[in-house]
Amino acid sequence: MATPKKLIKELILISGLRGLNFSDFIKRVLGLSNAAIKNPTIAPNLDPTPAVIKAKADAFNLLLSERIAIAIAYKAKTVCINTAKSELLRLINYSWAHQAQTAVAGKADLASKLGWFVKGIYTGEATVVVGMVNDSCPIINHVDNKVHLEHTVSIVNNLTGKPKLAKGAGRIEVYMQIGGDTAPNDISKMSHLGTATRGKYHKKFNVEDLYKPVYYMAVYINKKNQKTMTQSQVHKAIIT
């Protein structure tokens, strides 16, 4: 006698959640949870319960709504920012520029003091030649002491804010004084460290120098005669 065929086939259920965007995803999750809540006797032992899944889905939906509100606010704020930028460009380029140009009367040093770039001399690009060394000086704008018992001294030109050497300068020499309550004002009384490379000088200290103050000065050296020219103000840093 032949074996009878099964009349009820095994069902393989799928959630249908994969590949959906956030909006369709949460609609599908809520559909599943609401269906389970409406039909509690079909699958009475679901874990976690349909109520828990629905609560999590509602929380997810709230996050989506908040994100949409943030996106709308972001777009509106961007419009405001662009409008404010356009106004500043107009005021600087079409009002201040003319007034400042009249005020400096062709003097590049006065223009620089007011923060303006000068066409053909300095336009804000790092590749443009800096002014003469006699008209500028090095500035120690930062000393990084994040590495234990080490300092990295960063030096820029006062007119450009860039590490590029002033025209006529051959190099930058760095001097220091460890300790002392009074900042030095003469490099002849300080220790000579060496030459900065691309606006940087790296110095290592001994453990006995820990927590002592260090005073740095940077000096432009004339390219032709190797004499000391303009120098920076003193910069104080702590050895950590």
Image (cartoon, rainbow, N blue to C red):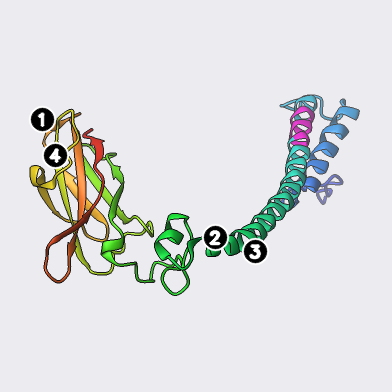
Instruction: Report which residue position mark 3 lands on.
Output: 94
What is the three-letter code of the residue carrying label 4?
A: Gln
- Relative placement, left or right, of 46 versus 146 is right
Q: CA distance from mark 1 to mark 4?
A: 15 Å
- Relative placement, left or right, of 177 versus 133 is left
Q: Which residues are magenta?
A: 54-62
Residue 204 in the image: x percent, y percent? 15, 43
Q: CA distance from mark 3 to mark 2?
A: 11 Å
Query: Which of 86/110 is in front?
Result: 110
What is the three-letter code of the residue carrying label 2?
A: Ala
Query: Which of 232/126 is in front?
Result: 232
| Of the two numbered discs 1 and 3 in the rendering, the one whose residue sits closer to the viewer | 3
**Above or below: residue 50 compared with residue 128:** above
Q: Label 2 near label 3: C-beta < 8 Å?
A: no
| Of the two numbered discs 2 and 4 in the rendering, the one whose residue sits closer to the viewer | 2
Mark number displayed over residue 100? 2
Label 1: few (<14), some (14–19) or many (≥20) C-alpha neighbours in 10 Å? few
What is the three-letter code of the residue carrying label 3?
A: Tyr
Q: CA distance from mark 4 to mark 3?
A: 48 Å
| Of the two numbered discs 1 and 4 in the rendering, the one whose residue sits closer to the viewer | 4
Instruction: Report which residue position mark 1 lands on.
Output: 208
Label located before the other in sequence (3 or 2): 3
Instruction: Report which residue position mark 4 lands on.
Output: 177
**Above or below: residue 103 compared with residue 67:** below
Image quadrant of residue 40? top right
Report the magenta stretch's main SS: helix
**Above or below: residue 192 compared with residue 147:** below
Label 2: few (<14), some (14–19) or many (≥20) C-alpha neighbours in 10 Å? some
The C terminus, quarter of image: top left
- The residue at the point 10 percent across, 30 percent down is 208
- The residue at the point 39 percent across, 67 percent down is 126
